[in-house]
Image (spheres, helix red, strand yellow):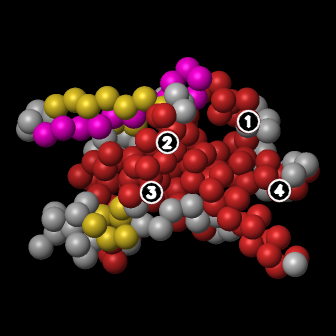
Amino acid sequence: MERVARQRNQTQIIMHAKRVLPLSLLYNAGGAIKGRTRFQKLAFLADQQLQDEGMDPYDFIPYDYGPFDKDLYETLEYLEDQGLVRSETTLTYGGDERYDYYLTKIGKERYSENLPIEADECTSLTEEDLPDVQSEGKLRFIKLHRISKSVVEDYGDIPITNLLDMIYEEYPQYAENSVLTG
């Protein structure tokens, strides 16, 4: 019975992380992420670090432009239906469509309300301070926020081709189906 409860709790954590990760990335990116490919790669990099924290919200596979999980698109659509995220389609200089994602005012408010502590405090707490957080759910939320912030700060402004090159070099198994490698 205890094992079943633990599995149910783990499933709830994954579902929670699956919906919160895109919001957290958008929140930490100043409310906007330009391009689906960039969103996929930032989510992938965060997912890699979240695995070390016992959270693995997405199952990325090698695809045309590296790591990809269709569940991320479905989650973004769900968040858009809830009024938390907005998407826009724009044309690139090459004439292709680019999908940009924005955190709505409601999305920002809801995300902020659910942070167990102030956003600035999340990153200033040391690992020793984190056990003082009252519940495991709040602790996981803080860790997800910290990882998202770190990923956005480290990789958010890198030109997309450089970001893809870095991912292909660091995670070569995700380059195997890429249309960019030969």
Mark 3 in CB contact with mark 1 (< 8 angstroms): no
User: Does label 3 or label 2 sit earlier along the sequence?
Assistant: 3
The kind of residue on which mark 4 rests is Glu
User: Toward which corner of the image does residue 156 lie, by quadrant?
Assistant: top left
Q: Residues within 10 Å of mark 2 (few under 14, many from 20)?
A: some
Label 2 – label 1 distance at C-alpha:
18 Å
Q: Residues within 10 Å of mark 4 (few under 14, many from 20)?
A: few
Does residue 17 appear left or right of residue 66 in this picture? right
Task: Give the structural element (helix, strand or loop) at label 3.
Answer: helix
Which-is-in-front pick, marks 3 and 1? 3
Quarter of the image that includes the N terminus: bottom right
Point 52% across, 28% down: residue: 83
- Picture disc at residue 78: 2
Which one is in front, 157 or 74?
74
Cα distance between the residues tagged 3 and 1: 23 Å
Q: Which residue is mark 4?
A: 136
Q: Which mark is residue 114?
A: 1
Mark 3 lies on residue: 71
Q: CA distance from mark 2 to mark 4?
A: 25 Å
Say left or right for 9 vs 159.
right
- Looking at the image, tell me whether mark 2 or mark 1 is earlier in sequence order: 2
Q: Which residues are magenta?
A: 96-107
In the image, residue 124 sits, relative to residue 7, either above or below, namely above
Q: Are marks 3 and 4 in contact (CB under 8 Å)?
A: no
At a point 51% along the width and 38% down the height, the residue shown is 79
